[in-house]
Image: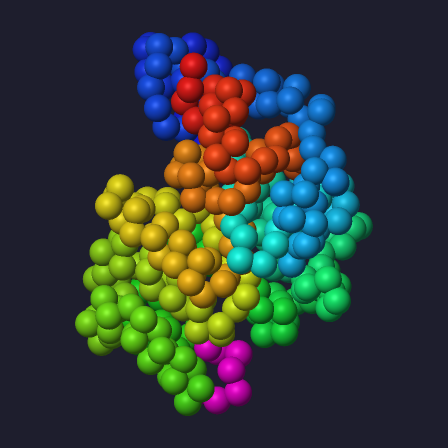
């Protein structure tokens, strides 16, 4: 979620895209204009490959994609290694969610390729459907908030996560594994999902995506709409999935500071292209990123 759009300087407050407070406000339009200048000297393919240790598991190569006939991503490149996390930040309309949509099969692909797999077993998944990408390529998409089925129980929501399994019994078995991992959900298995707290709903959304045991998690705005205590909980869950279960995570995060603190690498998106790419901690220390997106001066 971007900063509130304004075309003028306002009273003292936060400057930049997200988080922090200084003396002036920079409008979203100004952020975009200044970021576009940075994008003119964006990262090379070699630099992007190096961030993935030159051993990527997910690769996007020169992708042009969008909706209908509208192109949003322009020769976009991405590389993420196994067990690595990537955070995508940038202003509204930059193409962040379109990247997740393209990986999962929700966009029109005009040209380019999307591949998954280790070096000796790369697979072109560009034209696979979302169901095929979940079942055959091990890619799960965790939607933004409010994607649960509110009038189903917690248990039934988890069963729905296994809708591509051969039998309902397999989905139920997978749900039990989730309950073992997350006792908080087990305690609420018979509750309707609509009565859960914001943090519990987000945990359910993440857990439902885990039923099919994916290798890659596409996470769209994990902190959106959550209180700070639940935001910390969600990122602890994602950290566990990456570092203890070996998941590869590609996320879009409106809280740029929190996302970059979590992620191994980060891309700053502007107009469907990568303006800046680097280690998460490096981007946190980058004065341009700080000024435009983290509320720095």
Q: Is residue 129 left or right of residue 204?
A: right
Q: Position of residue 238 (x, y in %)?
A: 40, 55
Quarter of image, res 178:
bottom left
Q: Is residue 85 left or right of residue 155?
A: right
Q: Residue at x 80, y 50 (%)?
A: 111
Considering depth in this image, is 195 or 188 the residue closer to the camera? 188
Q: Is residue 99 left or right of residue 261?
A: right
Considering depth in this image, is 33 or 89 the residue closer to the camera? 89
Give the vertical position of 189 relative to 248 (above or below).
Answer: below
In the displayed orientation, state which residue is furthest to the right.
111
Quarter of image, res 10:
top left
Is residue 261 something that shows in the picture?
A: yes
Give the vertical position of 33 relative to 189 (above or below).
Answer: above
Location of the C terminus (image quadrant):
top left
Q: Position of residue 117 (x, y in %)?
A: 68, 64
Is residue 293 something that shows in the picture?
A: no
Q: Position of residue 105 (x, y in %)?
A: 64, 60
Give the vertical position of 45 relative to 28 (above or below).
Answer: below
Q: Position of residue 229 (x, y in %)?
A: 24, 45
Q: Is residue 284 magenta?
A: no
Q: Main secondary structure of the magenta part?
A: loop
Q: Is residue 167 magenta?
A: yes
Read off the magenta span: 162-168
Q: Residue at x 47, y 19 (%)?
A: 291
Quarter of image, res 204:
bottom left
């Amino acid at each position: 979620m971007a900063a509130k759009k304004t075309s003028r300087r306002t009273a003292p407050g936060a400057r930049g895209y997200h988080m922090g407070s200084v003396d002036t406000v920079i409008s979203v339009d100004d952020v975009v204009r200044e970021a576009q200048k940075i994008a003119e000297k964006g990262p090379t393919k070699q630099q992007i490959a190096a961030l993935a240790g030159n051993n990527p598991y997910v690769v996007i190569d020169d992708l042009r994609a969008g909706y209908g006939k509208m192109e949003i991503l322009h020769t976009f490149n991405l590389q993420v290694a196994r067990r690595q996390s990537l955070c995508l930040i940038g202003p509204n309309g930059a193409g962040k969610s379109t990247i997740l949509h393209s990986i999962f099969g929700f966009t029109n692909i005009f040209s380019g390729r999307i591949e998954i797999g280790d070096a000796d077993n790369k697979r072109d998944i560009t034209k696979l459907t979302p169901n095929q990408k979940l079942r055959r390529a091990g890619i799960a998409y965790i939607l933004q908030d409010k994607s649960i089925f509110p009038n189903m129980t917690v248990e039934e929501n988890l069963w729905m996560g296994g809708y591509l399994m051969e039998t309902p019994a397999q989905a139920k078995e997978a749900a039990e594994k989730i309950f073992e991992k997350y006792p908080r959900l087990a305690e609420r298995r018979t509750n309707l999902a609509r009565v859960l707290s914001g943090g519990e709903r987000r945990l359910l959304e993440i857990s439902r995506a885990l039923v099919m045991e994916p290798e890659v998690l596409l996470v769209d705005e994990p902190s959106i709409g959550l209180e700070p205590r639940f935001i910390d909980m969600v990122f602890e869950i994602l950290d566990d999935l990456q570092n203890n279960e070996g998941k590869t995570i590609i996320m879009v995060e409106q809280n740029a500071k929190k996302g970059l603190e979590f992620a191994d690498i980060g891309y700053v998106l502007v107009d469907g292209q990568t303006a800046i790419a680097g280690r998460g901690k490096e981007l946190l220390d980058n004065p341009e990123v700080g000024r435009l997106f983290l509320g720095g001066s």
